[in-house]
Every structure is written in structure tokens, then in C-alpha cells.
Amino acid sequence: MRYEDQGLDESHTDDERWVSAGPGDGALPRTEAVKDERVRRWDIATPSATQIGRAQSADEELPERLRRLHDEQHPAMQGHSERMHRLDKIRITHAICSRLDLTRWERDRVLGIMAELDLTAFGSQRAIPTVALVVVSHVVDRERQHQLGLDDSERLAALSADSMERLYELFDPITDDDTYQDFLDEQDLTTTNINRLKRVLKTQLEEQELEGAVLGRSPFRDPNLPAVEGGTADEREEAADS
């Protein structure tokens, strides 16, 4: 085979460079392809390049303290995965709530439950967005029913049929929200799925005692009262009097 056939002919210009089109050949001559592969594989190394978290050479092993750090067995890393999972639940749930027409109280109630809820009980439906949508439906509907007094059986028993009808017309379930329905479609959730997962959620709320959980708030504070944190004593007194 001629020397030129190997792509080593130096007489060709860049525009006239010979390119082999044989089976298994690339767009570059063999020598240039080998050189390109070498540069890409090894790149440039300097004596000052960091070796943090890696062995000093291919023949050496990681120090035991680094191995324990990578395996989250180091005291500084204990519980790291659990903390990150909790933050992911809060972050994803907050993003969903921000797209829905929720009050701040309803949002904080949803976040408080999701932050501490164990998702393993939901089985194959334990994805954070899926469970978050179930919690939103449970919390928001319960809160809105409570505001209208629909959870007071004695009061409802004393109402006339017309009063009951007008009262239920005021109830706005979260499932009537188009954005919420879009979220359900994205997660391939149906009414049957939601109802089944709601039963699982209610059981978990009882077992984990999370029914009154609220993120960053006391569950015993009336959300309709003005906040008393911060400000001067005079400002707090004025807020209490107003």
C-alpha cells in the first residue's frame, strides 16, 4: 500500500486533503484520528491539578476516610441523603403549589405534610409530584370545607335543603382547577388513582401524626389573625386592635 493511502501525504493542502471512504474509516485520516483521540482522552494535566476525592495514582486505593465520606459513613455526611430527599419534597411541592390558586395557609399546610411524610407507603405511586398532588387535594378541600362549615355535621343537619344547596355551591374543590387537572394528566392520574391514594394518605397521616403539620407555622394559630412577629411593641398593639 502506498504511503499516501495512509493519509500521511504532506503534499496535500487542507482543501485537497485526502479522506479515506473505506469501510470502518472515519472522516479524518487515521493519523489525525489517533492524535485527536489521544488529546481528547488524556487532555492536559498539570502538576497543580486537584486530586480531591481521588486516588493519587491508578495503582493506589482511596484512603479509608475518603471511602467513608463517599459512602456517607463519615460523621459529616450522616443523614445527607435523607436531608436532600426532604429538601426535594419541599422544593417540588412548593413549585406545584405556586402554580395553583392556593392561599399561603393552604400552601404551608401542604408543605408541612410533604416535608415529613414517608412516601414508601404509596408503592409504585410514590413519586414526589404524584404524592404532592394527592396531598394538595386532601388539604385544600379540607380547609375550604372547614371555612364553609361543611365539616360540622350538627350545623348541616339544622340547615334547610335550599341553604345546603347554596352552601355547597360556594365550595370550590381543587379538582375544578384547570391547572390542577393538567398536573394530573402529566402524572397519568385518574379519579380512581386519586381516591385510592387519598385513603393511603389518610392512614399515613394518622400513623405519623401529621394531620396538623404546617411548615414554619403553629397549627394552632388562627390564619385569619394578623401576624404578631416583628415590629415594635406599639406596632404589635396596633395590629391586635385593628
Image (spheres, helix red, strand yellow):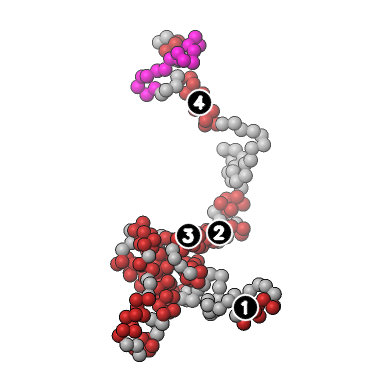
Most foreground residue, 70 or 29:
29
- Pick the quarter of the image with the N terminus: top left
Few, some or many residues within 10 Å of mark 3 (<14, 14–19, 20+): few
Q: How many angstroms separate mark 3 from mark 2 (CA)?
A: 22 Å
Instruction: Give the residue at x 62% y 52%.
Output: 65
Answer above or below: position of 32 versus 115: above
Secondary element under disc 4, as helix, strand or loop, is helix
User: Which residue is denoted by mark 2 in the rendering?
Assistant: 80
State the residue position of label 3: 95
* CA neighbours of label 1 inside 10 A, class few (<14), some (14 to 19), many (20+): few
Looking at the image, tell me whether mark 4 or mark 3 is earlier in sequence order: 4
Residue denoted by label 1: 239
Give the spatial CA distance, label 2 vs label 1.
Answer: 42 Å
> Relative to the observer, which residue lies in front, 95 or 235?
235
Q: Are marks 4 and 3 in contact (CB under 8 Å)?
A: no
The amino acid pointed to by label 2 is His
Depth check, mark 2 against mark 1: the one in front is: 1
The disc, 2 or 1, on the residue closer to the chain's N-terminal end is 2
Name the mark nearer the viewer: 4 or 3.
Answer: 3
Q: As drawn, is 5 to the left or to the right of 87?
A: left
Residues at marks 4 and 1 touching, judged by CB atoms closer than 8 Å: no
Please state the horizontal and vertical placement of residue 98, each as a whole percent of the image.
47, 62
Q: Which residues are magenta?
A: 9-25
Residue 58 in the image, given as x and y percentages of width and height: 57, 38
- How would you rate the neighbour count of disc 4 (Cα within 10 Å): few for under 14, some for 14-19, many for 20 or more? few
Say if the magenta span includes residue 66: no
Q: Along the horizontal axis of the image, is 119 left or right of 215? A: left
Q: Which residue is mark 4?
A: 36
Query: Residue at image x 46%, y 67%?
Result: 102
